[in-house]
Image (spheres, grey):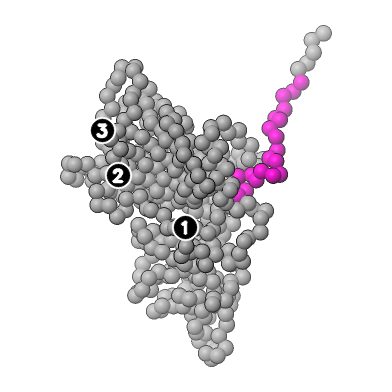
Amino acid sequence: MNQISPVQTDTTPEPQPHHPDLRRVNANPDFWYPVAWSSDLRKGKTLAVSYAGTPIVLVRPEDGSVFALYDRCPHRQVPLSKGTVNGQTVRCCYHGWAFGRSGRCIDVPYLGKGKLPNGVRTFPVREAGGLIFVFPGNPEKADSTPFPKLAQTDNPKYKTKHFSPRVNCHYTFMHENLMDMNHQFLHRRQMGQIKARFLGQDKGEDFIEARYSFMRCAGQQPLAERLIFGKHKDLQGKEQPVEEVVTIRTEYPYQTLRITDKDGDLIMDLWTAYVPVDKDERITQSFGLLSILRPQTPFLIDMIWPALGWFTNRIFLEDKDIVELEQAAWNEVGYDRNVEIFPVVKALRELLIRSGIPQDMPPANTAQQPATPATPA
């Protein structure tokens, strides 16, 4: 008698308690995070932004630098971003309470000066590379925390493109996607058939770096790629030599991708940050700066810029779709079932767990919890 084979069931093990689920590790707030483009905040105006569910209002006075406050008036919790800017203050749209850049309440129109209530939390702010950064964590750490190098934004030899896509996934999926260049099959329609060759890695306490070169197996070289890197010769089946080296680095919490030619000269420099938007950190606002070396022919970079923008956008949309599918799979079961085999990504995951904040851990400093705004010193 033939025996009926047992039904195969999914035996993927549950995550071990001593090993945090990477998708339940929050971003560490004790770093400088971009939250808006400078061009989006006009003089005399406010702009509402968010970091991991914390509402923040950016204020640009007619004179002076940008400042940032917790975006809730302590009176009735109405967003201060709905208010008006007067001098160095923002005034709530409801009852006219006014708050200065220090967060102090400096005027309630119907009260005397001696009866003013507590103020709102303020956030350290920096503006660089066309971006507005805030320090959402412990403000005492802001001055001692290194500020990132923003691609080649200050180098006239490069032209820089801005991009800021919003992606419906945990920020860690974004780090994994860019770090693992073995996914080029995904981009075969845009890039043709190319193969990533792993050249090595470096890692430390707060970074992981991987180096690759690419070999074209079939298909035509895309126009945008040819204009940037030059035409790669058809070797008629022979293995393509290393002509460019792609170096991808996660230096927590930022990520970079740099391409150098065979002489070691920098051709392309990408800097990006993945900023959690919602409290559960399932929505990520990306901010990126992509610097391209200007060719020797004047104005050629301006001519190819639209083609480059179209090309990079098509690549990103494919990446966006795939990481959102990964997030959807996580949502179905509620834990990370990934079976990772690439040593670089294994090391990256360890870095992200080590550097982030597991959701079941209490905050290290109450300044990270602005739900009840503290009175500024």
Q: Is residue 118 above or below residue 177?
A: below
Inspect the image, locate mark 1, and give the three-letter code of the amino acid beneath it.
Tyr
Residue nearer the viewer, 199 or 191:
199
Element marked by disc 1: strand
Where is residue 369 shown, x and y percent of the image? 60, 65
Q: What residue would you read off at disc 3?
A: 230
Q: What residue would you read off at disc 2?
A: 292
For the point 49% across and 78% down, which residue is it? 99
Left or right of residue 295: residue 175: right
Distance from label 3 to label 2 (Cα)?
A: 13 Å
Q: Is residue 203 magenta?
A: no
Mark yes or no: residue 334 visible.
no
Mark yes or no: residue 275 visible.
yes
Q: Is residue 14 magenta?
A: yes
For the point 55% across and 53% down, which residue is it? 27
Q: What residue would you read off at disc 1?
A: 33
Crowd rating for badge 3 (residues with CA inside 10 Å; few <14, some 14–19, many 20+) = few
Inspect the image, locate mark 3, and give the three-letter code of the amino acid beneath it.
Gly
Magenta residue span: 6-25
Using the rendered view, name the quadrant where residue 329 is placed.
top right
For the point 45% across and 46% down, which residue is it? 255
Where is residue 187 shown, x and y percent of the image? 42, 32
